Every structure is written in structure tokens, then in C-alpha cells.
């Protein structure tokens, strides 16, 4: 005879525990202490087994019967309900431990040595600002595409379409790692193709040959009253045309004064390879002037922060200086690279492969990747001097001839 809720409620404890059966293996065990526990007795592979469902009345009679029926369905599929229950509990514990934030930081620790310090900071910012506040605490296995899309929409509303796309890309890499390590079964980012707004691809703004004289004049006159340290950073960017992150994180320990070279470690480079920058006389003069002004600060940075000299200048300093000079719409610091590539090829007639090597770009020739890092260094050293002379000749309205720069009278 099946139990009723009144029977369960009125069951009193006795000196010894006893059981009230509901049928199908379900029974309520009444303990001498007065506790009432739901249990199911069943047979699996010929062995008698039991599982506990919880205490009455927290687990109602109806809920206990549903659990019994679920156990019968598992048995019909030759699945042990006890094992299934343990697996469910293990999964729940794993989900608590495997939050999106926990897996993201685990992935970051594995990947970070492949990236430059600047890129590491960029990825951390994306996770901490755009992902962790919204889905960081969720089990990664439970995150659905709409959950991730909500995060990305918040970035879109700021008008930061590029950052929204980068955030989606970063999340996709995290989900891919989670799938590989068995933490989740799907990549929520893969199902968001076409869900985000996009804007037309734009290349870095760069000066052209006609705009260069006016820019050099503005930089020389400095009517924008830039700090001298900042102005030197702009000149150094022009003369060396390295990436803004490499410029601002340049350290005195990397400068070889005797060889007139700047040695940049692989971890600072986008392509993760050591890089040598031959330094022109003009670049050396900038460094000496900078050292004379900042030497007393006891800072490792060639271009220290104006406010916190123990830190490098911020990544927006040179771009802000360019804007204050009145050329913010025409170029960015990164645009000096495109400017140099174009003019060194067209005006100074250097081979493209030599220029690309100086830009620290990946060679198109797969065999080139195995070459020594000093490849074309003998060609690059005079090229960098010719480039600095070319800039100075334009600044002084000189006539430029490849390899022999003559100042006009």
C-alpha cells in the first residue's frame, strides 16, 4: 500500500529505526532520533544497492517518487543510479571549481610566455574589464552563446567595436582550451558569427611624403610645448620606426653604445624573436640627450613616465604628442613604420626584404625563418643611417641622394 503525506508526517520515532514502504523500492526510514530519510532499494547486476534521496519533509513524498522513477529509467538503460548520482555530484563540484575566470587564468598562464609583455597586459585587460565582471563566476560548461553575447553587447554600446571583436576572439580561445581539457563541450563564441556590429577595416594612419616636411617643422618648432622627453620619443620613433610598445619599453641595458645597436629581447617583440636595431648617429644623439636628462632618476627605462619614472611612459604618450602637434588625423605612432617602409623603398632604393627585416616582419620565404637573427645587419646599418639623414635633409629642406645626403645652401 502506498504511503500518504499524512502517514509520513505522523510517523513517530521508536526505540529502533523502522521503514515505511511506498513501493517500487522507495521507503521512508524513521530513525530513533526522529529524522526521516528517503531511500531507494534496487538491484544492479544481481547485487542489492541503496541510494539516499534526502530527508523528509525537505524532500517531499512527490519528489521522492519522481527520484524513484528516474532511477528506474536509468536501470532500464543498464545505468547504475548510484553511479549516476556520484557522477552528477562530481560534475557539480567540478563546475564550481571550473568557473570561466578560473579557466581563463589557467589558459593565460599557459599562453603568456608566447606573448610580449604588452600583449599580455592587453589580454588581461580584455578579460578583467569585459568578461570577468559578467560571466567570470559562471561554470564555463554552463555558459551559452546568449550569455557571452550579453558581454559583447556591453562593449558595443561603448562604441568600441574593435574591442568587442577582440573580446569575442579571446573568449573563443578560452573556450577552445576548456574543450581541450574537458571542462566544457562547446565554444560559445563560435556560434556568434555575424552577431556583432563591424566597421570597415582601416589601416594605421600614416603620413605621406608631402605631409612629412610640415610634420617635421611642427616637431622641430614645438609650439605645442611637448615635454622634451616626449619629443625625443617622437624623434626616436621616426628614426628607428619600431612599434610603439617597443619604443616605450626600451631599456638602457638594451643599448650597445660601442656597436651602436639596440637589442630588443624576444619577449617584447610581436613575433617573439630577438631583434637588433642599428642606431643612426641621430638616434644615438637622442639617447645621449635623454640619458643626460633622466640619468639622475635611476630608472631602467629610456623613456620613463613623466610622473612615475620607475615606469615606462604610457602607450598613448606619442600618439597624444602627435595629436597636440596637429597631425592626429593624419598619422599615429605606428604609422611611422608604413612611412619608413614606403620612402626607404621608393626614395632610398633599398631592397624590400632588408626593409621587412628591419621592421621585424615575418619573412615570406619559409627558409628565412631559420636564418640568424642578424640577417642583413650589414645592409640594415647603413640603411638606418641613410633614413635618418633623409629625415634631417627634409627638415632642413635638403636635397636627398641615396647614400650621399647634401644639404642645400
Image (tube, grey):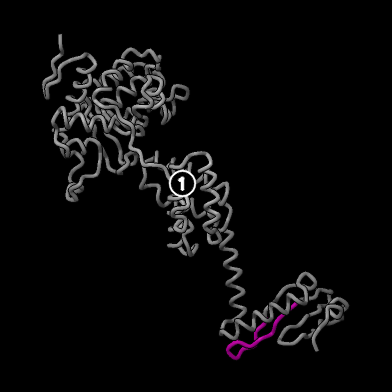
- Tell me if I can see residue 382 in this picture: no
Q: Residue at x 21, y 45 (%)?
A: 363
Quadrant housing residue 295? top left
Above-or-below relation of 216 to 100: above
Determine the residue positioned at 45% across, 62% down. Answer: 179
Above or below residue 254? Residue 93 is below
| Quarter of the image with the C terminus in it | top left
Give 89 or 300, whichever is nearer the viewer: 89
Q: Is residue 150 magenta?
A: no
> Circle 1 is placed at which residue position?
197
Farthest residue to the top: give it. Answer: 409
Q: Give residue 250's position: percent from left, percent from top.
A: 34, 30
Point out residue 183 in the picture as x, y percentages from the top left corner.
49, 62
Confirm whether the magenta stretch covers residue 39: yes
Q: Which residues are magenta?
A: 38-50
Q: Nearer the viewer, residue 327 or 401?
A: 327
Amino acid at each position: 500500500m502506498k504511503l500518504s503525506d499524512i502517514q509520513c508526517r505522523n510517523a513517530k520515532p521508536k526505540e529502533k529505526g523502522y521503514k515505511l514502504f511506498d513501493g517500487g523500492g522507495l521507503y521512508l526510514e524513521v530513525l530513533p532520533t526522529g529524522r526521516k530519510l528517503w531511500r531507494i532499494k534496487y538491484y544492479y547486476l544481481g547485487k542489492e544497492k541503496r541510494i539516499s534521496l534526502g530527508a523528509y519533509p525537505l524532500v517531499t513524498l512527490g519528489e521522492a517518487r519522481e527520484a524513484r522513477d528516474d532511477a528506474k529509467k536509468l536501470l532500464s538503460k543498464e545505468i547504475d543510479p548510484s553511479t549516476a548520482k556520484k557522477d552528477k555530484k562530481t560534475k557539480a563540484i567540478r563546475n564550481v571549481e571550473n568557473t570561466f575566470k578560473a579557466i581563463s587564468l589557467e589558459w593565460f598562464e599557459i599562453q603568456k610566455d608566447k606573448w610580449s609583455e604588452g600583449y599580455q597586459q592587453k589580454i588581461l585587460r580584455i578579460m578583467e574589464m569585459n568578461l570577468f565582471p559578467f560571466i567570470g563566476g559562471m561554470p564555463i560548461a554552463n555558459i551559452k552563446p546568449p550569455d557571452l553575447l550579453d558581454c559583447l553587447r556591453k562593449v558595443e554600446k561603448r562604441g568600441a567595436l574593435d574591442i568587442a571583436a577582440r573580446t569575442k576572439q579571446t573568449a573563443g580561445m578560452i573556450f577552445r582550451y576548456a574543450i581541450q581539457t574537458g571542462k566544457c563541450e562547446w565554444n560559445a563564441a563560435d556560434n556568434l558569427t555575424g552577431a556583432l556590429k563591424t566597421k570597415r577595416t582601416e589601416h594605421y594612419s600614416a603620413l605621406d611624403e608631402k605631409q612629412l616636411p610640415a610634420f617635421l617643422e611642427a616637431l622641430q618648432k614645438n609650439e605645442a610645448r611637448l615635454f622634451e622627453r616626449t619629443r625625443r620619443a617622437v624623434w626616436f620613433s621616426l628614426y628607428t620606426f619600431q612599434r610603439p610598445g617597443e619604443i616605450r619599453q626600451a631599456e638602457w641595458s638594451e643599448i650597445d653604445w660601442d656597436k651602436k645597436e639596440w637589442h630588443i629581447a624576444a619577449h617584447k617583440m610581436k613575433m617573439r624573436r630577438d631583434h637588433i636595431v642599428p642606431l643612426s648617429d641621430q638616434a644615438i644623439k637622442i639617447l645621449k640627450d635623454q640619458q643626460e636628462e633622466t640619468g639622475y632618476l635611476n630608472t631602467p627605462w629610456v623613456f620613463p613616465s613623466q610622473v612615475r619614472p620607475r615606469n615606462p611612459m604610457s602607450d598613448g604618450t606619442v600618439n597624444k604628442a602627435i595629436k597636440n602637434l596637429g597631425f592626429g588625423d593624419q598619422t599615429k605612432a605606428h604609422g611611422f613604420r608604413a612611412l619608413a617602409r614606403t620612402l626607404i623603398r621608393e626614395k632610398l632604393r633599398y631592397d624590400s626584404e632588408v626593409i621587412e627585416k628591419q621592421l621585424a616582419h615575418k619573412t615570406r620565404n619559409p627558409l628565412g625563418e631559420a636564418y640568424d637573427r642578424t640577417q642583413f645587419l650589414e645592409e640594415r646599418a647603413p640603411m638606418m643611417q641613410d633614413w635618418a639623414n633623409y629625415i634631417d635633409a627634409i627638415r632642413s629642406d635638403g636635397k636627398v641622394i641615396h647614400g650621399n645626403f647634401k644639404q642645400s645652401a
